[in-house]
Every structure is written in structure tokens, then in C-alpha cells.
Image (cartoon, helix red, strand yellow):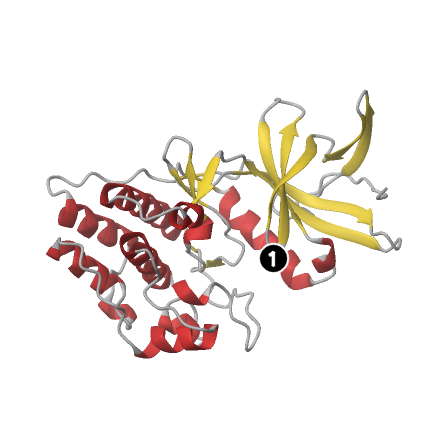
Amino acid sequence: MNRSTAGRRRPEDNVAPGTTRTGSVEGPLGTRRVLLERYEVGEVIGCGATAVVHRGRDLRTGRSVAIKVLHENLATDPRFHARFRREAQAVTGLRHPEIVVVHDAGYEHSTDASGVPLRRPFLVMELITGRSLRDVLERGLPTLAEALDYQLGVLSALEASHRAGIVHRDIKPANVMVTAQGAVKVVDFGVARSSHDPAATLTLPGELLGTPSYLAPEQLRGYAADARSDLYSAGCLLHHLLSGRPPFVGDDPVSVAYQHVHEEPARVDTGVAALDSVLARALAKERGDRFQDARSFRVALLRATRGGTVRPGPDAVTSTAC
């Protein structure tokens, strides 16, 4: 069994709000793993390259939550701690219907099987019942109406995050959830950066953040991403939703990256000329030739496909509470 330690809450120590306290609680069903004396950790519901996601329960409110914990084998790497901290800081202050809510954050102190002390960051987030756009696309091509709804939701989320100065840097189908009600939730701000601080980057020389199939040419060439880079990635997502594949595919990441920088994507003939033009502009190689903000992209998409009056997207509500 892992050994856990406890500590007082201090804002300077938390991943996003403050410190953490972890421990185990004896109950009728045996020992329970509890974080911050509040969040009970349940079964694993997802696992990625850097973290495992558990179903959890807020013992104060009874609310079901998702708890994302860094993998043990990465617990000593400060870069991954920094990414958790960046994700918590990026999302905790945002309240927007199409962005996942982060309720709390901290560190779990324990030991590994060899008795080595571990300090693993975790995030407590809203539990999303649904599936990712990656899962949706694996089951088949969505209808045009569905594809547009998904895309508009993503652009609404980007409009809000960019307004708050947050560049996502990894928009792709796996990072877009579709709830059981059909609503979109953008997740995983782990490699996000602040547009207000150009020096704030978690990238090391020669390191590539994000997924090559959806990265902008400037990112692949080693330049800093900005909001227009996210919009290029959103254009790649739209291409995938409309055609069933990303704009560029290849046998390895290098060949895909080369195509993003030097080649034109395969044409998608949607039968709607205005929509084809929107997609072409979103995938422009040069930032200055793309949509300059998410609202412009969203408005152009609406006008191309639905006409009529364009209503503003929901504003993000910023808050320091978690």
C-alpha cells in the first residue's frame, strides 16, 4: 500500500489553487484513497501517455468528478509537473459551457513499490459522460449538420480561451468531448500557454508539443504558437469532420510535418462553395492569411452554411474560485 502524507493548504504550494492533502480512509468496504480529505478516488476510466483518469466522488457534495493523476513513472520529471500546473492555471479561471471545468488541484504524496517518495500532481475536473470526437470519427463520418455543430462548439471554446489569453496548442479530435446530450467540451490544456507571456513555454529545444496531424506549420517549424495556430488546428479538425481524415497523412510524423509546411491539403468538396472557401482559409500556410480570431472563423462558418443573423457565442466567465 502507498504511504501518504498530509499538509496544510497554502496557495503557493498547490498545482492550481494551493497544496494538497492525501490519505486513506477506513470504511465498511475497506481502505479508500482520498485526496485533500475530500475526493474519493474510484475506478480508472481513461489512460493516456502522461496521466490516468479515475472516476471520483466529492465527499462534501456527493458530486461525481473525474480525477486526473500523473503517471508514477513521470512523477520525478519537472516538465510534467509544470504541464499539470499550466493546465490547472489555464482552466481553473475559465467558466464556459464548452470548456471542461477544473474544480480543484493538488499533489498526492505517496511512495512507489520500492519505497521511493513520490509527489504526483492531480486535477479534479467535471465528469463528462460521452465520448471523444476521435471515437465519433472511428465509428464513421458525422452528418454535415453534426460536423458543423461540433466545429462551432470548438470555435466558441477557443474564442473564450483566447479572450482570456490562453492558447490551447493541441486541438485534435481526442481533446474534444461530446456529451450524451450532444454538447462539445474542449479538454486537455496540458500544453497550453499564455499569450500574454511569450516567454512562457514548456517546450525544450527540439521538443514538439502537440500532435503533428493537427499542428500549424509555424509550430512544426519551431516557432511559438498563437491564437491563429489554434485556428489552423481547428481547420484540420474541420477537414477531418468533413472528409473522414486529417488534411495530411503519412507513414511517420516527419512526412506529415513536411506536408503541413510545404504542400496543399487534398480538396474537400462539400457541395457548398462558401464552406470550401472557409476551410481553405482556415488551412492557409501563413498566419496572416488565416482567420485572425476564433469569432471570425465561427461567423464565416455560420454564414457559409446557415445564413441569417449570427448571434454572439457565450462569453466565458472568469473566476479564481475552484
Residue toward you, 240 or 108? 240
**Residue 135 higher or lower than 183, as above or below:** below
Residue 315 visible in the current orientation: yes
Screen quadrant of the C terminus: top right
Residue 5 horizontal side relative to residue 237, left or right: right
Instruction: Name the residue: 23% across, 41% down.
Output: 145
Question: Looking at the picture, how far across and down is residue 7, in whole percent?
Answer: 79, 40
Report which quarter residue 67 is drawn in.
top right
Report which quarter residue 277 is drawn in.
bottom left
Instruction: Name the residue: 70% across, 30% down.
Output: 38
Residue toward you, 24 or 203? 24
Q: Amino acid at mark 1?
A: Ala
Question: Looking at the picture, how far across and down is residue 70, in whole percent?
Answer: 67, 51
- Which residue in the rendered view is the most extreme toward the front? 139
Residue toward you, 270 or 313? 270
Residue 156 horizontal side relative to residue 40, left or right: left
Question: Looking at the picture, how far across and down is residue 313, in whole percent?
Answer: 28, 40
In the rendered image, which residue does mark 1 sit on? Answer: 49
**Residue 269 higher or lower than 139, as above or below:** below
Screen quadrant of the N terminus: top right
